Amino acid sequence: MVTPYIELGPLTKRCVTDVPVSTLFYGDNLDVLRKRIKDERIDLCYIDPPFNSKRNYNQIYNNIGIEDRAQAQAFVDTWSWNTTANEGFAAILDNEGGRFRPQTIDLIKGLRPVLKDGPLFAYLVSMTLRITEIHRVLKPTGSFYMHCDPKVSHYLKLVLDTVFCSQGGDFVNEIIWHYTGGGRSKRYFSRKHDVLFWYSKGNTARFNLDAMRVPYKETSGFAKGGITSKAGKKYEPNPLGTPVDDVWDIPIINPLSKERLGYPTQKPEALLERIIQASTNAGDVVLDAYCGCGTTVDVAQRLGREWIGIDITYQSISLVLRRLEGKAGINWPSILKTITVDGIPRDMESVVALAHKKDDRLRKEFEKWAVLTYTNNRGAIHEKKGADSGIDGIAYFRTNSTENASMVIQVKSGGVGRGDVAKLRGDMAREGAVMATLITLEQPTGPMITEAKSAGQYHHDLMGRNYDCIQIVTAQEIVEGNRRLDLPMSLEVVKKAQAHAGGEQLGLLGGTGSDENEDDE
C-alpha cells in the first residue's frame, strides 16, 4: 500500500493528520515528525543519528560473481553553520506556538557564545529541533533511547535534560554498549564502546525486567542451584536468569555474518532486540527517525511490534525495502503488501520537485531514486570520484547459471542531446559493460534515439531475446508507466563490507557508529 508523495512545506504548524503504523517515510524527519505524527502516538523511539564525526560514509555493494565492489555515499556526517542552521536557531528563539521549553531556549542561547557558529553548534541545533518533536509524539508511558558518541554525548545530555526533565520526564539510564573487534591503539586506551541515553516521558515508563535477564555465570552460586546464607536461609535462583545491568556486552556484526548489509554504522539486531523487548510489549509502536538500513524496523516487525521508520536518503529507503522483501516468504507474510511507503515520488510533479531540490543533503537524491526505482532496488549506486565519470548506477544481471554481466546507468535532470548518448556509449565500453541506460527527466530527441539505436543490440541467451545496447528511459515512463528493468538480476546483497581504503570510513569493521580507525598492535 502506498500513499501519494506529499511536499510538506514550511514547518509552522503541528501535525493535523496521522499515519498508519508500519509506515516507511522518505523525507526529512523533522518534516515528518511535525506534519505526520500526532501527539502521544509512539511507545518507544530509538535513534542512531549522525554523530558529527566529520566523515562521509559509504555503502559497499558485493555482487556475486564480481570481484570489484561498487561504493556509494550513504550519508554525510559533516556539519556547518549555514542557512538551515541559522533558521533552526531562530526557530528555537522565536518559539512559535510554544514548541520549546524555556530551559531549552536558555541552553541553546547560552551555548552559542561558547561554541560559536560552527559545526558542533549546528549539529546541536539540528538535534534540539528533532528531540523536541520526539518528546511530543511519545506516549506518557513512552521511552526514548538515543545512541550517541562520547565526543558529543555530554552536550546531548544537556539538551535531553531540558526537553524531558523540564516536562515531568526523567533520565533513566546511561547504557554502555561495549564491544570488541577492529583495531587496537598504541597511543591510548582503545575506544570500544558507544553510549545510549534512556529517557522516560513520565514516571510510568514500561520496563520488562524478566525480558532483560541473562543466564547466570558458571562461577555464580546461583548457576549451581542457589546460595545458602550463614543463617541457613537459601536464596533460590530466578529460572530466567539474572537481570541485565547498564553495561551491555553485545558482539559487533562479524564481517562474514549474514546479518551484515554493507551499510556504514549498521547496528547488530541483538542490540535493538534488547531495547525493544525492555521498553515495549507486542503491538506497541516503535519509531526510528534515522532508520538507515532498517535494523529497528526489521527487529520490531519480527517481535510483533508496529513501527514507523524515517530516512532522508532514498538509498536507505531502497535498502530497507530490500531487507524486508528478503524476509517475505520465509516465516513472514508478504511484507511489502502490508506496509505504507510515503514520500516517494508518484507523479511527474513530485519527480520534478525532487530533481530540483536545492538542499545539499538531497542533491543526488533524484539520481539515486531513478537508478534504484528502475532496477527494483537491485542496482548499485555508483560513487563518482574526481571528474564526472558519467555513471550514476550499475546493474548486474545473469547471463546464464554461472555468469553475469553489467549495465551502466546515467541519470540526467537537465538538458540532454545526442552527445550525451555518444558519451554514454564510450563510458559503457570503458567499464566493460554490455549495455547502458540513460534515464532522463526530459523527453529524448530524434538524434538521441538514432544515436542509441546505432549502438546495436545485445542477445541475452537466458532470456532468449535481443536488447538495445543503449536504452533511453524517461522519468515519466518510470513513475507513470511503471517501466522497470526486465533482466534476471544478480544477487547484489550488500555484505562482507570492509573499511574504505585509507581509513575514510568508520563503523564497517566494528558495525557501530563511533568505532575509531585505530592502529593495529
Image (cartoon, grey):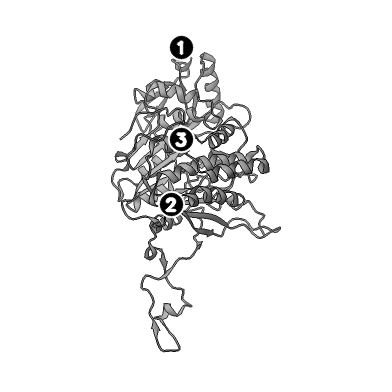
- Which residue in the protein does label 2 denote? 201
Residue 188 spot, x, y in % from top left: 69, 59
Of the two numbered discs 3 and 2 on the same chain, state the one appearing first in sequence.
Answer: 3
Hey, what amino acid is under mark 1?
Answer: Thr
* Residue nearest the viewer, comparing 8 with 430: 8
Q: Residues within 10 Å of mark 3 (few under 14, many from 20)?
A: few
- Which residue in the protein does label 3 denote? 97
Rendered-image quadrant of the C terminus: bottom right
Cα distance in 3D space between marks 1 and 2: 59 Å
Q: Secondary structure at mark 1?
A: loop
Q: Residues within 10 Å of mark 1 (few under 14, many from 20)?
A: few
Residue 88 spot, x, y in % from top left: 55, 35
* Residue nearest the viewer, comparing 200 with 68: 200
Q: Residue at x 33, y 42 (%)?
A: 21
Q: Residue at x 47, y 77 (%)?
A: 220
**Residue 445 has which mark?**
1
> Please, is residue 59 above or below residue 453 in the view?
below
Q: Nearer the viewer, mark 1 or mark 3?
A: 3
Q: Residue at x 55, y 51 (%)?
A: 157
Of the two numbered discs 1 and 2 on the same chain, state the one appearing first in sequence.
Answer: 2
Residue 402 can be seen, yes or no: no
**Residue 172 has which mark?**
none
Q: Residue furthest right?
A: 187
> Please, is residue 128 above or below residue 154 in the view?
above
Q: Residues within 10 Å of mark 2 (few under 14, many from 20)?
A: many
* Residue nearest the viewer, comparing 180 with 160: 160
The quadrant holding residue 345 is top left
Answer left or right for 43 relative to 433: left
Q: Nearer the viewer, mark 1 or mark 2?
A: 2
The quadrant holding residue 222 is bottom left
Q: Nearer the viewer, mark 3 or mark 2?
A: 3
Hey, what amino acid is under mark 3?
Answer: Gly
